[in-house]
Image (spheres, rainbow, N blue to C red):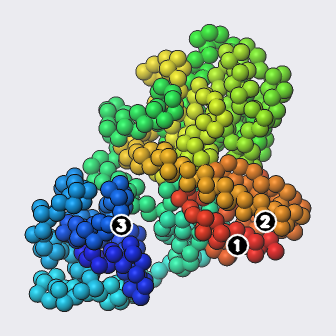
Amino acid sequence: MKILVDSNVILDVLLMREGVLSDSYRVIRLCSEREIEGYAAAHTVTTLFYILRKDFTPDERREMLFDLFTVLKISSVDFEKLLSAILNFDFKDFEDCVQDECAAAVGADFIVTRNVKDFENAKIPAVTPEDFIKIFDSQFENAKLDLESDKKMETQEEIFTRDNNNYLPVFNRYKIVLERGAGAYLYDINDKRYIDFLAGIAVNVLGHNYKPLVDAISQQAAKVIHVSNLYYTEPQAAAAEKLVKLSGLDRAFFANSGAEANEGAIKIARKYAHQFDAEKSQIITAWDSFHGRTLATLTATGQPKYHKGFEPLPGGFDYVHYNDISELEEKISDKTCAVMLETIQGEGGVYPPKDNYLQKVRELCDKHGALLILDEIQAGIGRSGKFFAYEKYGIKPDIVTLAKGLAGGVPIGAFICTEKVAQAFHAGDHGTTFGGNPLACAAANVVLDTVPNEKFLAHVEEVGKYFKEKLIELQQKYPDQISEVRGEGLILGAQLSNSKKSGVEIVNECMKRGAIINCTVGTVLRFIPPLIITNEQVDEVTKILDEVLE
C-alpha cells in the first residue's frame, strides 16, 4: 500500500500535538517500519520547513530533512535542490507542485491529511489519519483471514517439530519463533513483543528494520548480489577504504564470518613469521577465549569443552590466563609467531583488560618479534564506545579481526593488517568465493557510515554508563545473587554468585516477561543490545530483571 502524507500529519508528530498525535504517529511509524510505502510531496516538505523556520537552525533543518528521508520518500524532486531551498527558504521552484498530481505520479492509494476538504476534487481519495488506520487495520485483518483460508498458518509447535526433524541438533534453542523486528524490539509469530538486549549476539548494531540498511540491501540486490572476487566492485572498494582509515592499519580482507576472519589472521601471521624462521610458529591465546569453530580457530579457543571429540587438533597453540602478564612473559619467546587475544573477552564472561595489560602485551610482542592479533568480532564496531575497542587502551595491533555487527545483520567477516604483514601474502595464498560480495559490503557501508559518527559513539558511551549504573544498583540490592558487574560501553556482564536461580532460569523468566538477554559460561548474564537503545529501554530491561531476581 502507498500513501502520500500531508504536512499537517508530519507536524502532529514533530510538534507532539495532543489529541491527534496517536493516529498521526502510527501513520508515520507504519511508514518507518515499512508496513506501508510513504511519500511526501516536495511542496509538503517546503511548507513544513517554512512553518518551522523560526524554531530550527540551518543545521537542524538539514538533519530533520535527512531524518524525514529515512521515513518518507520525497516524490519528483532533486534532493540537492530541495536541500538548498530548505536551507535558504527559497521555495519558488516548488510552489506549483500539486499534491494530487504527486500522489497520482507515485501510484498512491490515499492522501493522508487532517484537511480532507482541501482535496474534495482530488483524483486520489483523501482520508484522515484516524480513518486511514481503520482502513489499514481492516485490510490487514482481511489479509490474515485470506491467508488462513488458503493455507492454515503454522503454529509454534509445528515449526518446532519441523525444525527438530530436519535441522542438525547443535543448538539449544529457546522455545519461541521470532518473525519480525523494529528498532530494539522483536516480535514472535503470536505477535508477542520482546525487547532485544542480545542483538543476535552483538550483530544487530543498528537495531531491526533500520530503513537505510534495508534500503541499501534491497537496492544492491536489484543491481547485483555476487560476482566473485575475480572482479572489482565499488561497494567492496568503499568498505575496505573505510576500514583502513578507521583502523589506522593498511590492508583489509573480507570473509563471511568471524571464524573465517580469525582463520585468515592466523594464516597470514604464520606466513609472515616463516619468512624469518620456519620454526617461528607458536600462537599464544587466552584461556576462556572464543575465536571460532573451524579446526584452527577452535584450537585457538581456550576452552577444552569445545575441543573434545575433534582431536587431533592443529599444533602450535598455547594458552595463558587473560590479564596475567607474568604468565605471558614465561610463555612467549623468539619462536612465538603471534599473540591472539580478544580486546574484551566476550563468550568467556565479559572481561575487559586490567592494569595496562594490553600495553604490556604489545611491548612483549615487540620485544620478541611476535605479531599482536586482536579479535574484535564481539567488542568491535562501536560496542565499547569506540569504533575499535583497542582505541580505549592506547595501542594498535598488527592485525585486527571483525565480523558480527560489521554489516548490521548480513553475514560478513574481515581482518585488517599492517603493510608489512600484508606483504607476506601473494596472489593465491588466500581467498574466498563469497567474502566481500556487493550485497554484504553495501550493508557494511551503511554501518561504516553510521557507527563511527562522534554523536553515535557518544550515545553508546552514555547509555552504556547508565546501564552499568543500573546493573550495579541491582548488584547492591541483590548482593547474594550478583557479585560483580563488568564491561565497557554496551558489552556488559553481571556475574552471578550463589543465586537462587541459575543463569538459564533467569534468562527464561526474563523472556516470559518480554526481555531477551543471554547467559554465558553458565554464570554471567551478558548484555549486548543494539547500539541504538535508550535509557528508557534500559529501564525496561532492568525493571524486568529486578522482578525476576526478587
Q: Nearer the viewer, residue 220 or 110?
A: 110
Determine crowd level at label 3: few under 14, some 14-19, many 20+ residues with C-alpha closer than 10 A: few
Q: Secondary structure at mark 3?
A: loop
Q: Quadrant of residue 4?
A: bottom left
Q: Earlier in the sequence, mark 2 or mark 3?
A: 3
Q: Which residue corresponds to mark 3?
A: 55
In the rendered structure, the answer to whether residue 321 lies left or right of residue 168 reads right
Q: Which mark is residue 502?
A: none
Q: Position of residue 195 (x, y in %)?
A: 59, 69
Quick one: quadrant of the N terminus?
Answer: bottom left
Looking at the image, which residue is at 45% across and 32% down? 245
Label annotation for residue 543: 1
Q: Earlier in the sequence, mark 3 or mark 1?
A: 3
Image height of 334 relative to 258, above or below: above
* Amino acid type, label 2: Leu
Where residue 187 appears, x then y in whole percent? 53, 72
Mark 1 belongs to which amino acid?
A: Lys
The mark lying in front, picked from 2 and 3, is 3
The Cα–Cα distance between marks 3 and 1, rounded to whole angstroms, is: 37 Å
Q: Nearer the viewer, mark 3 or mark 1?
A: 3
Can the viewer see residue 309?
Answer: no
The part of the image, by quadrant, that contains residue 48 is bottom left
In this view, the residue in front, 24 or 493, is 24
Identified by mark 3, the residue type is Asp
7 relative position to 395: left or right: left
Q: Residues within 10 Å of mark 1 (few under 14, many from 20)?
A: few
Q: Position of residue 242 (x, y in %)?
A: 43, 36
Q: CA distance from mark 2 to mark 3?
A: 41 Å
Residue beneath disc 2: 474
